[in-house]
Image (tube, rainbow, N blue to C red):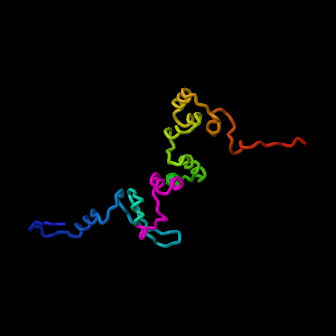
């Protein structure tokens, strides 16, 4: 850093200059990570610890720092990165946590089983798929596709392609008024006649 001051200026605040330079100076840089924040928090045992929060992610590079980072507690809300690095099961857990956190902000508690169903549906093909009309195109049930969002489009495609529905999904069963093969629809109650 070079510094030039006019001779007429008597007062110069060197500490504020150094503070502003320190904020913009890069000490170490990792590709894919734009900013880091080191926060102090208390763990469940009541001990203080430091937690590193980043903007951006580069999991492969972070593995090189296993001597200073606890990689067993590494977490990212980037579902694709977690699925690629740790597998689809970890992506499933990230989806559940992120949806739960979104509802928690508004004070809404959702049964974890419901969140698990949503996450399972998004990951059951072995890849992360969004829960929208584009992802449901891979579903084999035309009636379930129609119940999701764009009914006319799916009805037209199913008719033109000669698709048929086995009525195995709960959505398809509900459309035609058939009892869903799950819950109380999974069995019949029989009363003895004697």
Task: Spot the residue most to the right.
Answer: 194
Residue plotted at (53% across, 49% down): 126
170 over 21 or under it: above or below: above
Place of residue 66 in the rendered image (x, y in percent of width and height, measured from the top left): 43, 68
Give the prevailing secondary structure in the magenta stretch: helix
Residue plotted at (57% across, 49% down): 120
Residue 106 visible in the picture: no
Q: Nearer the viewer, residue 127 or 101?
A: 127
- Residue 10's image quarter? bottom left
- Does residue 81 show up magenta in the picture? yes
77 over 17 or under it: above or below: above
152 over 37 or under it: above or below: above
Residue plotted at (41% across, 60% down): 60
Q: Look at the image and give the residue range highlighted in magenta.
A: 65-93
Quadrant location of the N terminus?
bottom left
Residue 110 visible in the picture: yes
Place of residue 189 in the rendered image (x, y in percent of width and height, measured from the top left): 79, 43
Q: How many marks?
A: 0
- Does residue 96 show up magenta in the picture? no
Q: Nearer the viewer, residue 132 or 58?
A: 58
Horizontal side of 117 relative to 180 (left or right) equals left
Task: Spot the residue most to the left.
Answer: 7
Place of residue 153 in the rendered image (x, y in percent of width and height, measured from the top left): 51, 30
Task: Spot the residue most to the bottom.
Answer: 47
Place of residue 7 in the rendered image (x, y in percent of width and height, measured from the top left): 9, 68
Quadrant location of the C terminus?
top right
Q: Nearer the viewer, residue 100 or 54?
A: 54
């Amino acid at each position: 850093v070079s510094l030039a001051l006019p001779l007429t200026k008597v007062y110069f605040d060197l500490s504020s200059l150094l503070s502003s330079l320190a904020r913009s100076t890069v000490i170490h840089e990792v590709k894919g990570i734009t900013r880091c924040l080191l926060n102090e928090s208390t763990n469940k045992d009541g001990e203080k610890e430091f937690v590193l929060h980043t903007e951006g992610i580069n999991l492969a590079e972070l593995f090189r720092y296993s001597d200073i980072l606890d990689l067993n507690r590494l977490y990212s809300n980037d579902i694709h990165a977690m699925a690629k690095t740790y597998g689809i099961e970890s992506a499933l857990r990230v989806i559940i946590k992120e949806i739960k956190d979104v509802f928690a902000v508004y004070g809404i508690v959702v049964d974890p089983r419901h969140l698990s169903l949503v996450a399972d549906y998004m990951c059951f093909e072995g890849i992360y798929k969004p829960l929208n009309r584009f992802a449901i195109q891979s579903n084999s049930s035309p009636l379930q596709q129609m119940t999701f969002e764009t009914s006319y489009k799916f009805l037209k495609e199913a008719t033109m392609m000669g698709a048929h529905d086995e009525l195995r999904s709960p959505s398809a069963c509900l459309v035609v008024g058939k009892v869903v093969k799950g819950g109380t629809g999974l069995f019949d109650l029989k009363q003895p006649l004697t």
